[in-house]
């Protein structure tokens, strides 16, 4: 589904990504871990097409990313950023409806299928009680859920998320993780997500990719990636503070 080949990105003199290779299969869930500045969000931005790499390539379904036209890419890929700014009044259902823009008829606008997808996404994320609310008046956590619903409504086969549980309480963190797992298992969606909560990631992502200093230092199951030695070396904390799933 997704292949990253020898991807390198620099910000001035700083190397943000250094020859990163990554392959993600259809319907696979992969969590990107690493300390601040490791290159996680940079990698996600390059894959989403919002940042151009200095060298290397990104392929989706075997096709280079830059060969896709934007409408086609929007039907294939959905992105949930870490923060979303809404500069003007917009109801929650209107924000979620933005996810259907790549599918709408250019002249007829939203159709029955689009409206149904919006309703399903709202209910699936569990934000029906927020209908009619101005997105700008929501808490940061509620707004994050609305953005997740927008991505679900988009119906893309590849879902990229930058810290999807940011601003969420424990209940909603787990609910979003369960939703991502359901999207992968039931809908065949490929999920690639930047995660800072190591314990949460290890419990919900069968595969973790650990980055440090712009390089992939480990790739595999949570148990294999988050060894006590690696947690101590990469995160510089006592491994006993991190609860890693052993399955």
Image: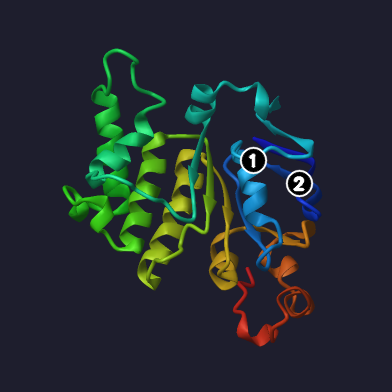
The image position of residue 182, as x and y in percent, is 44, 50
Mark 1 vs 2, N-terminal side: 2
Q: Is residue 173 left or right of 96 when viewed as pictured?
A: right
| Up-down relation of residue 152 to residue 215 (above or below) | above
Residue assigned mark 2? 9
What residue do we see at 16% from left, 48% from top?
Answer: 132
The image position of residue 120, as x and y in percent, is 28, 40
As measured in the structure, the alpha-carbon distance from the residue carrying label 1 to the one carrying label 2 is: 9 Å
| Up-down relation of residue 247 to residue 176 (above or below) | below
Residue assigned mark 1? 51
Total marks placed: 2
182, 117: nearer the viewer: 117
33, 29: nearer the viewer: 33
Mark 1 and mark 2 in contact? Answer it, CB < 8 Å. yes
The image position of residue 216, as x and y in percent, is 78, 57
Res. 56 image quadrant? top right
- Which quadrant does the C terminus fall into? bottom right
């Amino acid at each position: 589904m997704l292949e990253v080949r020898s991807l390198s990105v620099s910000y001035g003199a700083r190397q943000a990504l250094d020859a990163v290779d990554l392959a993600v299969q259809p319907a696979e869930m992969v969590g990107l871990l690493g300390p601040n500045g490791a290159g996680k969000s940079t990698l996600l931005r390059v894959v989403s097409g919002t940042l151009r790499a200095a060298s290397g390539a990104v392929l989706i379904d075997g096709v280079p990313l830059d060969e896709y036209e934007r409408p086609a890419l929007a039907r294939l890929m959905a992105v949930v950023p870490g923060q979303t700014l809404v500069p003007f009044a917009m109801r929650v259902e209107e924000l979620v409806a933005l996810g259907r823009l790549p599918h709408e008829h250019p002249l007829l606008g939203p159709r029955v299928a689009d409206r149904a997808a919006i309703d399903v996404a709202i209910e699936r994320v569990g934000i029906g009680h927020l209908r009619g609310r101005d997105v700008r008046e929501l808490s940061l956590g509620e707004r994050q859920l609305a953005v997740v619903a927008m991505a679900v409504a988009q119906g893309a086969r590849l879902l990229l998320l930058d810290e999807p549980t940011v601003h969420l309480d424990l209940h909603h963190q787990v609910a979003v993780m369960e939703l991502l797992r359901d999207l992968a298992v039931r809908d065949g969606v490929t999920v690639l997500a930047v995660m800072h909560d190591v314990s949460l990631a290890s419990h919900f992502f069968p595969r973790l990719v650990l980055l440090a200093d712009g390089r992939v230092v480990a790739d595999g199951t949570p148990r294999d990636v988050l060894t006590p030695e690696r947690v101590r070396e990469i995160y510089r904390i006592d491994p006993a503070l991190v609860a890693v799933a052993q399955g």
